[in-house]
């Protein structure tokens, strides 16, 4: 069980949270202009990083707010959590 | 390759079993091969075996970073079934089941296939409807299946809790009699021995660190044992498909999760079929040693740690105790995790890639073991002919662009 620090509520157990997958995926400005390949890339292709990964979580059973985390997917070490509006911490690349 | 038989057993008994021939060689890699298969799990070894047997291609190397069968082949709950909803899935999984049915004889290796029947329980009205629909679809596709009432379930599994007073009472089940379990290690060892017997090189402790290309074509791989060249390379690596594809600059729609399983202390025979429940989410069977083997769902987050969260174990054991109160005082003996590569539509990717000569077989999610023989059989065809077999053509990488997804989420008889 991970111990996750919600930026609003502090450290809570993983069961209070729900996972939201890769963070910082930008929705295309003009979806109509995309071809099928580009649209599929936006929808489905993922980094699936082994190592430090920027990901989204929602504190579902708490404040119900979304936030981002930088977590090492091999060791499960959470390097930082930060609000949706904030930039990822230095050193944690997408 | 010595044939295993009662006579070879007797002959070796005379020598106190000290003189058994090694089941496979451990050759040093040659500089050139016709085909390189990255990954020495069940799927990779099956691919190598069928390349030799069905297509006469024997100048093949199987590269394994650890030891063969040490990944997900040795970590699953060994359940085999083919009761999938969609035509494409039913076809490939039933091909696999048919190959399993003759595999012990074919490989001259006892894979301990036990077609003891697989039950999928229904706990609510939509489960019941889904089961009726799936069984009808299965029968239309020539896959055996029947719908059981609670009474029939209770007769088959007397220890099951059929009380109506539970939170999720059992309302019925689907049964595939041809489904069951097999010895997972024996699949890897049997295919390895048979492939080796046909001249294929199995190279263990050889990690691939790069995929070499020239002008959009594959030329070989970089490994911890040096460069090995081949015009055709197949990536068959459960748990690290994304990493390997990245070496060839391919981004896949695959997400990797930890999946756990566990076994109890061994007890006398108590359950003689496989019971799976979607709604309370657990599956159980009893091994020949007497241990109860439990499995359930993945951890929600991406993970490469080969260990899952204990809250998943808690949910799984709670489900077991609800279905089988008699198991509540059993002690758990081992618990472990593996990494499963899941696709958005819960179906695998088996076929060609944008790089010429590079093939991918991965994304089997939580249910790759049952697909092992069929997976190897179709991939061998794909590699030999450089075009997919009709069985794996729908499982191409392009389906995420065309939208022709094979959506087995919830349709595959288990929750994903």
Image: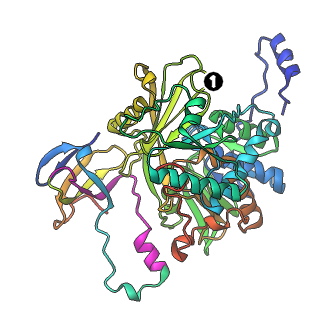
Q: At 11% from the left edge and 54% from the top edge, which residue is drawn?
A: A8
Q: Considering depth in this image, is A69 or B68 the residue closer to the camera?
A: A69
What residue span does the magenta drawing correspond to? Answer: A37-62
**In the rendered image of this protein, does residue B290 appear above or below residue B363?**
above
Q: At 12% from the left edge and 47% from the top edge, which residue is drawn?
A: A10
Q: Chain of mark 1?
A: B
- Identity of the residue furthest to the right in this view: B7
Q: Considering depth in this image, is A13 or B213 the residue closer to the camera?
A: A13
Q: How many marks do you count on the picture?
A: 1
Instruction: Name the residue that disc number 1 marks.
Output: B288
Density class for disc 1 (Cα within 10 Å; few <14, some 14-19, many ≥20) is some
Mark 1 lies on a secondary structure that is loop
On screen, residue B207 versus residue A21, left or right, reads right
Q: At 47% from the left edge and 84% from the top edge, which residue is drawn?
A: A35
Q: Considering depth in this image, is B163 or B17 the residue closer to the camera?
A: B163
On screen, residue B177 versus residue B250, left or right, reads right
Quadrant where the N terminus of chain B sits is top right
**In the rendered image of this protein, does residue B71 appear above or below residue B239?**
above
The verdict on residue B151 being magenta is no
């Amino acid at each position: 069980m991970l111990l996750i620090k919600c930026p609003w509520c502090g450290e809570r157990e993983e069961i209070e949270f729900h996972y939201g997958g890769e963070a910082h995926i930008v929705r295309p400005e003009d979806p109509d202009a995309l071809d099928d390949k580009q649209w599929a890339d936006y929808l489905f292709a993922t980094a699936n990083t082994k190592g430090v990964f920027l990901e989204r979580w929602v504190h579902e059973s708490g404040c119900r707010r979304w936030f981002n985390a930088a977590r090492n997917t091999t060791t499960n070490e959470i390097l930082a959590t930060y609000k949706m509006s904030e930039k990822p911490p230095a050193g944690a690349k997408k | 390759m010595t044939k295993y038989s009662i006579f070879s057993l007797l002959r070796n008994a005379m020598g106190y079993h000290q003189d058994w021939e090694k089941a496979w060689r451990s050759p040093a890699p040659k500089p050139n091969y016709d085909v390189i298969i990255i990954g020495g799990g069940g799927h990779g070894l099956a691919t190598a075996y069928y390349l030799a047997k069905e297509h006469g291609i024997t100048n093949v190397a199987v590269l394994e970073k650890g030891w063969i069968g040490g990944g997900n082949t040795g970590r699953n709950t060994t359940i085999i079934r083919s009761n999938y909803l969609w035509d494409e899935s039913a076809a490939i999984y039933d091909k696999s089941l048919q190959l399993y049915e003759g595999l012990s004889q074919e490989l001259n290796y006892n894979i301990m296939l036990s077609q003891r029947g697989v039950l999928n329980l229904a706990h609510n009205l939509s489960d019941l409807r889904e089961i009726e629909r799936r069984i009808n679809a299965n029968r239309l596709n020539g896959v055996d299946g029947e719908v059981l009432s609670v009474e029939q379930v209770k007769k088959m599994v007397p220890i099951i809790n059929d009380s109506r007073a539970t939170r999720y009472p059992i309302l019925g089940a689907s049964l595939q009699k041809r489904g069951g379990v097999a010895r997972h290690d024996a699949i890897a060892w049997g295919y390895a021995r048979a492939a080796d017997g046909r001249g294929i090189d199995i190279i263990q402790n050889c990690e691939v660190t790069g995929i070499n290309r020239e002008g959009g074509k594959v030329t070989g791989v970089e490994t911890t044992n040096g460069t090995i060249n081949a015009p055709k390379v197949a990536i068959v690596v459960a748990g690290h498909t994304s990493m390997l594809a990245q070496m060839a600059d391919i981004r896949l729609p695959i997400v990797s999760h930890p999946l756990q399983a566990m076994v109890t202390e061994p007890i006398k025979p108590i359950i003689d079929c496989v019971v799976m429940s979607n709604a309370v989410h657990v599956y159980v069977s009893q091994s020949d040693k007497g241990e109860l083997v439990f499995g359930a769902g993945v951890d929600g987050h991406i993970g490469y740690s080969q260990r899952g969260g204990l809250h998943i174990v808690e949910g799984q054991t709670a489900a077991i105790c609800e279905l089988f109160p008699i198991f509540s005082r059993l002690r758990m003996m081992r618990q472990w995790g593996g990494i499963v590569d899941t696709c958005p539509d819960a179906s695998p990717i088996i076929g060609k890639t944008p790089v010429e000569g590079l093939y991918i077989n991965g994304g089997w999610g939580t249910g790759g073991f049952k697909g092992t023989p069929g997976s190897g059989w179709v991939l061998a065809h794909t590699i030999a002919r450089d075009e997919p077999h009709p069985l794996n053509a729908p499982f191409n990488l392009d389906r995420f662009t065309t939208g022709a997804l094979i959506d087995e989420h919830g349709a595959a008889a288990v929750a994903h």
